Amino acid sequence: MGLQRGFRSVVIGLDGSAHARRAAAFVARLKPAGRASIVRVVEPVRVSSTGLLPTAVRVRILGEAAALNAARMRAARREVDAAAAALRRAGWRAQAQVRSGVPLPELLRAVRAARADALAVGARGVGGVARFLLGSVADGALKHAPCSVFIVK
């Protein structure tokens, strides 16, 4: 599939960054020829071992973590809904998805589920030690995606 004919299915990975929003805008400027799935993966806040804490403290910590996760999911929903609306205005058949989990594997699952022939992501610019320790979703997408990958900076 090339830029001239368009893509039958594109997945756009959002992460709250300006680079990811530019990736969505990039796809919106392409000739709409199919579906666009806008995917935001929220990595949940996990609370490590709380078994030794007093019950009241444990309940409070777990409640705060749940509230934070819910707030992050709501913010992600607003982000993907806005991007989907912009893509629809550009002529794409767009759907928005919010997933919970580790970003790269979830994004690749979305690509396979959509049978996408392109993936667009933003480059957050993580470098040095952070990239070594955390990896890069854009780098992982290049290495593991079963389709073309656009990295927008």
Image (cartoon, rainbow, N blue to C red):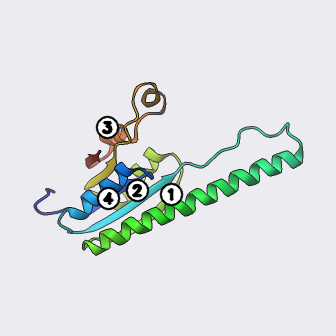
- The label on residue 143 is 3
**Which type of secondary structure does the marked residue at label 3 adopt?**
helix
**Is residue 8 visible to the viewer in this orientation of the structure?**
no
User: Residue 141's x, y, as percent?
Assistant: 34, 43
Q: Which residue is mark 4?
A: 24
> Nearer the viewer's eye, disc 4 or disc 1?
4
Name the N-terminal-most of marks 4 and 3: 4
Q: Residue at x 69, y 55 (%)?
A: 66
Q: Residues within 10 Å of mark 3 (few under 14, many from 20)?
A: few
Q: Which badge, 4 or 2, comes first in the chain's sequence? A: 4
Q: Position of residue 28 (x, y in %)?
A: 26, 64
Whole-percent x, y for residue 135 in the image: 43, 33
Q: Residues within 10 Å of mark 4 (few under 14, many from 20)?
A: many
Foreground disc of the pair 4, 2 = 4
**Side (left or right) of 144 relative to 32:** right
- Seen as rendered, the residue at the extreme front is 18
Q: Earlier in the sequence, mark 3 or mark 2?
A: 2
Quarter that holds the N terminus = bottom left
Q: Which residue is mark 1?
A: 99
Instruction: Answer above or below: position of 95 versus 3.
Output: below
The kind of residue tagged 4 is Ala
Give the Cα separation between the discs numbered 4 and 2: 16 Å
Q: Secondary structure at mark 2?
A: helix
| Residue 136: image location, x then y, percent | 40, 37
The quadrant holding residue 111 is bottom left
Left or right of 117? Residue 74 is right
On screen, 16 above or below 89?
above
